[in-house]
């Protein structure tokens, strides 16, 4: 039933799609791969980084509450997460220009070398950026 199944994308609702696109482009290297107009006067922007896609949808209303590692409300995504090799280099590149909501924190008690920081995108979506996470070894 799941033959060929793989992760596809995350759809984000955005007050300003172009500001959100710039955030993911600037800080994470996503690039625009498509934009479509479904015929209702709106545009959906598709971003890609390797095998990860984001779809940016227009939305109105107040931005989400960005904080910590994301909302702890049932039915809402807590955060989206990206991994990289050097968290310190990433943080140095931020130079205080992106809002950190939590961290950086070390989780050496669980996995030696696992470190994480959380940022807020322009609409309050929390983005976790981690270094060093590994799955547990298979049990025998």
Image (cartoon, rainbow, N blue to C red):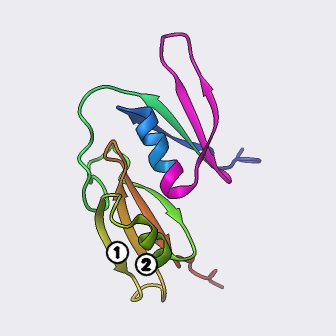
Residue 19 part of the magenta-drawn span: no
Q: Quadrant of the N terminus?
A: top right
Q: Give SS at disc 2.
A: strand
Q: Magenta region: which residues?
A: 25-52
Residue 36 part of the magenta-drawn span: yes
Give the image location of residue 88, x and y in percent. 45, 78
Above or below, comparing residue 73 to residue 34 in the picture? below
Left or right relative to 61: residue 105:
right
Q: Give SS at disc 1.
A: strand
Rendered residue at 37%/67% (across/down): 95
Q: Are marks 2 and 1 in contact (CB under 8 Å)?
A: yes
Left or right relative to 110: residue 74:
left
Above or below, comparing residue 37 to residue 45 in the picture? above
Rendered residue at 62%/44% (across/down): 8
The residue nearer to you, when weighing 129 against 8, is 129
For disc 1, the marked residue is 104
The residue nearer to you, when weighing 56 against 18, is 18
Q: Residues within 10 Å of mark 1 (few under 14, many from 20)?
A: some
Q: Residues within 10 Å of mark 2 (few under 14, many from 20)?
A: many
Residue 6 disc label? none
Above or below, comparing residue 116 to residue 29 in the picture? below
Rendered residue at 42%/88% (across/down): 108
Left or right relative to 30: residue 100:
left
Q: Quadrant of the C terminus?
A: bottom right
Give the image location of residue 38, x and y in percent. 56, 16
Extreme-right residue of the structure: 3
For disc 2, the marked residue is 115
Give the image location of residue 111, x and y in percent. 47, 85
Inter-mark Cα distance, 2 to 1: 7 Å
């Amino acid at each position: 039933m799941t033959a060929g199944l793989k992760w596809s994308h995350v759809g984000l609702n955005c007050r300003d799609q172009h500001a959100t696109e710039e955030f993911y482009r600037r800080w994470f290297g996503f690039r625009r791969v498509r934009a479509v107009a479904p015929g209702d006067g709106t545009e959906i922007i598709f971003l890609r980084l390797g095998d990860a896609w984001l779809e940016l949808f227009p939305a109105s209303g107040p931005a989400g509450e960005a904080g910590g590692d994301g909302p702890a409300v049932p039915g809402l995504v807590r955060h989206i997460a990206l991994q990289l090799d050097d968290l310190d280099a990433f943080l140095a590149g931020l130079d205080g220009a992106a809002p950190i909501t939590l961290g950086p924190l070390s989780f050496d008690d669980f996995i030696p070398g696992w470190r994480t920081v959380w940022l807020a995108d322009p609409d309050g979506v929390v983005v976790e950026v981690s270094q060093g996470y590994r799955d547990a070894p298979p049990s025998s």
